[in-house]
Amino acid sequence: MRWSRALLLILFAGPVWAVDGYILGGGVEADSADGLAAAVFTDIGLSEKTRLSATFGRSSVELPRGIDLSTSYADVGLDHWFDPVGIRSEVAYWGDNDFLDSLDWRGALYWRNDKVTLSGDMEYRDFEFNIAGSDIRPGRDVRFHAKGVGLSARFQLNETVSLNLMGIDYRYNVDLSIGGNRDITDFLSVSRLSLINSLIDYRAGAGLGLDIGDQRWDFDYRTWKGEVDGSITHSATLNLTTPIGKRGDIQFGFGVDDSDTYGSITFFNVQFFYYGGY
């Protein structure tokens, strides 16, 4: 399963820009390819205009070679709004240090008011790929990096409807295409590592949100291109968020992926949110 998708569902649900207080969240996701993921998340208001966030999660997939791969994710972010301009910074770790992992540095400069948020996003990813040895060649580590530049926007169209747009493009310092680096592509082309949003050429998406009473419906569409084999993936998700008690929300999500590489899969997730101090 693509791990970052599960995290995005957590990070962008709920009123994370309340003046004070904190949010605690967590959730699980499963898909028809036997992928499983779980995550916990917190967002804390340090002041009226400064927030600290953190996420930790684990995912598990079975590789075609019969290897069970467990992937870890952790990030810490700081956001300060100077009104109307804000700055967001984040450091994250993703991967399995026995196979492929990355240390990611992210930053954003944004402008917002009550109706519109516009953001310029940058990302630097430092990868390490561990190539296992064999009888005819020794194992070795391959280091490479990627730089991403993107834009995102949110529009509050009226009191109940919102629109989100995003896109990011990556450039790598090595040739990861099939035939460009056989040591990397020989492994990635037969594993699901390339399907966890780790090595992509670009990602783009749009989302539409609708508030109906105390409930919120969100429809999200995303597409991305793999850097290794050039495959295109389309993903559509429908989420329903509804209150549980006075300080909590629960979110149910259902989605479908269609990929040139791994075909069609479905996935389902459940997320929980608790709002403290509001």
Image (cartoon, rainbow, N blue to C red):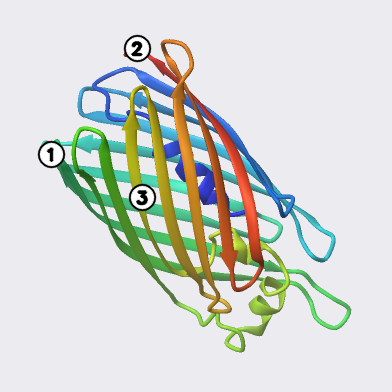
Judge from the rendering whether residue 69 lies leftward or rightward of residue 115; answer left or right.
right
> Which quadrant of the view contains residue 28?
top right
Q: Name the front one of labels 2 and 3.
A: 3
Q: Is residue 13 visible?
A: no
> Which quadrant of the view contains residue 162?
top left
Residue 128 screen position, x and y as percent: 59, 64
Against 227, is 40 above or below? Answer: above
User: How many angstroms separate mark 3 from mark 1 (CA)?
Assistant: 19 Å
- Residue at 45% x, 54% y is 104
Q: Mark 2 or mark 1: which comes first in sequence?
A: 1
Give the residue pinned by disc 1. Answer: 113
- Label 1: how many Cα within 10 Å (few below 14, some 14–19, many 20+): few
Q: Mark 2 or mark 3: which comes first in sequence?
A: 3
Q: Mark 3 or mark 1: which comes first in sequence?
A: 1
Judge from the rendering whether residue 3 lies leftward or rightward of residue 245; answer left or right.
right
Q: Nearer the viewer, residue 235 or 278?
A: 235
Q: Which mark is residue 207?
A: 3
Residue 53 screen position, x and y as percent: 40, 33
User: How many angstroms separate mark 2 from mark 3 (CA)?
Assistant: 29 Å
- Label 3: how many Cα within 10 Å (few below 14, some 14–19, many 20+): some
Give the residue pinned by disc 2. Answer: 277
User: How many angstroms separate mark 2 from mark 1 (CA)?
Assistant: 24 Å
- Label 2: how many Cα within 10 Å (few below 14, some 14–19, many 20+): few
Amino acid found under the numbered disc labelled 1: Asn
Q: Name the element at disc 3.
A: strand
> Which quadrant of the view contains residue 268?
top right
Q: Nearer the viewer, residue 66 or 6?
A: 6
- Residue at 48% x, 16% y is 244
- Residue at 64% x, 62% y is 264
Amino acid found under the numbered disc labelled 2: Gly
